[in-house]
Amino acid sequence: MSDNSNTLKNYINNSSYIVAFTGAGVSADSGIPTYRGADGVWQKYDPSKFTSIDYFYKDPSYYWNFFKDVRYPGLKQAQPNPAHYALAELEGKGPLKSVITQNIDGLHRLAGSSNVLELHGNTRRIVCLKCSEKYTMDEAFELLQNQIPPKCPVCQGLLKPDVVLFGESLPLEVLNEAQEEARRCDLFLSIGSSLVVQPAASLPDMAKDSHSKLVIINKEPTSSDFKADLVIHGSASETLRKALYLGD
Ligand code: NAD
């Protein structure tokens, strides 16, 4: 094992309250593109439009066409990768207490993680903005075949993915819980996040200020690297697989 993998393995083995904080990079090996970073390429749809609440209200059909062409087919075929499974296994063994994720793809739960704090919601859930009725993404996809944007079958209200778009506030309860976890842990693993989206990106600082060890695993450098006890520039799945399974 490399020195970095050894150090990560030692940190994990010597910690009793580990919190993982994940971003889009953790799902890149499942075939879901990131927004930022070298592989974050979106050709047909502009992320500044399909991630914006202002644009959603201005032209909801833009999001729903993106959902039909890109998001839905992408999520239908995406499977958890070794990084998701490694975190689920670490929870099962005991030391990992929670996964705080910025991702909206639901892959941590599919891999078997149970204590998942979804800061930005889950794109597999669809909600009616008028009567709050919830739908699955399969139901929304069915509705899309008849009209775009799809309307709520109960009240004809506008349907929206149950996610936090740019311009919306994070769910306060989930954010508070995530902050508590960051203050409580003795090892904070930031995995696959560019650490630029606030307030989520301040969680590593919070952990560090509360005397936790901080490990950053990301393909590219982040502006928080200098604060970390260990920085690994590499693939999330490869790094976690090595640190958790090799040398046992
Ligand atoms: P980001 O797109 O800003 O950054 C992703 C980072 O992951 C980049 O710095 C990149 O270098 C790194 N990366 C790429 N492939 C990697 C790999 N295999 N292993 C390790 N690192 C890798 O992502 P963010 O920080 O999560 O913030 C963007 C926002 O976009 C979040 O709010 C999130 O909700 C949303 N988003 C979610 C998904 C998803 O649910 N899978 C996908 C794209 C964007």
Image (tube, rainbow, N blue to C red):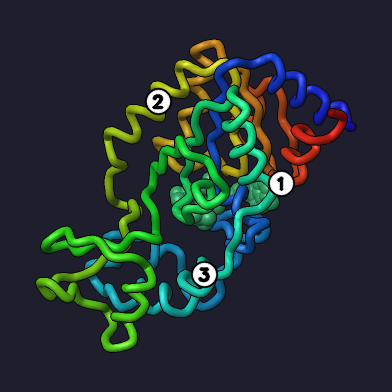
- 48 on left or right of 107: left
The Cα atoms of the two marked residues, 2 and 3, are separated by 32 Å
From this viewpoint, is residue 219 visible?
Answer: no
Earlier sequence position, callout 3 versus callout 1: 3
Residue behind mark 3: 76
Coordinates of residue 108 in the picture (x, y in percent) = 53, 47
- For residue 20, above or below residue 45: above
Decide: few, some or many residues near mark 1? Use Cα within 10 Å; few <14, some 14-19, many ≥20: many
Coordinates of residue 203 in the picture (x, y in percent) = 47, 28
Decide: few, some or many residues near mark 3? Use Cα within 10 Å; few <14, some 14-19, many ≥20: few
Coordinates of residue 237 in the picture (x, y in percent) = 71, 46
Residue behind mark 2: 179
**Amino acid type, label 3:** Lys
Residue behind mark 1: 237
Q: Quadrant of residue 194?
A: top right
Q: Residue at x 46, y 45 (%)?
A: 102
**Amino acid type, label 2:** Gln
The Cα atoms of the two marked residues, 3 and 1, are separated by 20 Å
Coordinates of residue 177 in the picture (x, y in percent) = 36, 28
The Cα atoms of the two marked residues, 2 and 1, are separated by 25 Å
User: Is ligand 1 within 8 Å of the beta carbon of the residue shown at mark 1?
Assistant: yes
Q: Quadrant of residue 230?
A: top right
Q: Are marks 3 and 1 in contact (CB under 8 Å)?
A: no
Foreground of the two, 54 or 113: 113
> Callout 3: helix, strand or loop?
helix
Depth check, mark 3 against mark 1: the one in front is 3
As drawn, the residue found furthest toward the bottom would be 146
